[in-house]
Amino acid sequence: MGVEELISIDPLELRFAFELKKQISSSFQLLNKTDHHVAFKVKTTNPKKYSVRPNNGVVLPRSTGNVIVTMQAQREEPPDMQCKDRFLVQSVVARPGATPKDISPELFNKEAGNHVEECKLRVVYVSPPKPPSPVPEESEEVSSPRVSESENGHFNTSELAAVSREHVEVENNSSEARTHFLKLMEEKNSAIQQNVKLRQELELLRRGNAKGSGEVRLLYVVLIGLLGILMGYYMRNS
């Protein structure tokens, strides 16, 4: 008849979501499969790198116990994310009613004839979970308040009022912009008309000056001609 297995361990590997400069924890569970009190002790090949809580204890009959292993913050990433560290869990039958204070190194001494079970756990590094992608926020300038329906199918009064106020503000802003635009167009048309009027007056002024100069020349010729006639008439009579 084979020896009864004292405890089972789940899982059989410690998985650490490795991140630089950050403490990381992993855990495993001990299941006492017997009707006895079972004492356990946890050892590791790299005690300075890990802290184990608890590193020893007693699992009551047909019950479970949890062990948390914390890896100290690491400054360098291991090559290829591989780890050679190992853990050893030893278990032995303890006296009825035993407590963690009753655990001693002699209890796990095989040379003293004690039946000590051993289970090895390996360490596995895994990539940390990726953070969820941020949901883009809706632009305040584009989005408008959403109107939600209550359970009875009616809209929320406060949300309807908010939507109505926003609609009125948009209409008021549009009306003011349209009025300002029409005023600018009127001022532009008025400026164009004044410019045309000034050009017409300037052209008339230029034509008036040219006509006045021609009349002066004509008057001068007429006066010379009259003077010549008078002198000829005077000379004949004399």
Image (cartoon, grey):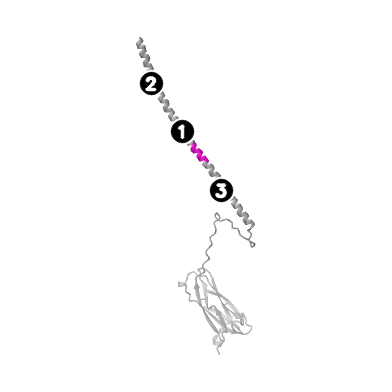
Residue beneath the point at 39% across and 20% down: 222
Q: Residues within 10 Å of mark 1 (few under 14, many from 20)?
A: few
| Residue on which disc 2 sits | 221
Describe the element under mark 2 as helix, strand or loop: helix
Give percent across and percent down for residue 26. Answer: 54, 74
Nearer to me, 143 or 153: 153
Give the answer, above or below, for where 125 lies relative to 232.
Answer: below
Q: Which mark is residue 174?
A: 3
**Label 2 close to label 3 by CB (< 8 Å):** no
Tell me how far mark 2 sits from mark 3, CA to CA: 72 Å
Figure quadrant of the N terminus? bottom right
Report the residue marked by disc 1: 200
Residue 209 image position (x, y, % from top left): 43, 28
Q: Amino acid at mark 1?
A: Gln
Q: Position of residue 176 (x, y in %)?
A: 57, 46
Q: Which residues are magenta?
A: 186-193
Q: Are marks 1 and 2 in contact (CB under 8 Å)?
A: no
Which residue type does callout 2 highlight? Val
Q: Is residue 15 left or right of residue 157?
A: left
Q: Earlier in the sequence, mark 1 or mark 2?
A: 1
Q: Is residue 35 above or below residue 231?
A: below
Residue 109 in the image: above or below residue 69: below
Residue 216's place in the image compared with 236, above or below, is below
CA distance separating discs 1 and 2:
32 Å
Task: State whether residue 48 appears in this view.
Answer: no
Q: Verify whether residue 40 appears in magenta.
A: no
How packed is label 3: few (under 14 Cα within 10 Å), some, or many (20 or more)?
few
Mark 1 residue element: helix
Q: Measure how far apart labels 1 and 3 are at the Cα level.
A: 39 Å
**Quadrant location of the C terminus?**
top left
**Residue 178 visible from this viewpoint:** yes
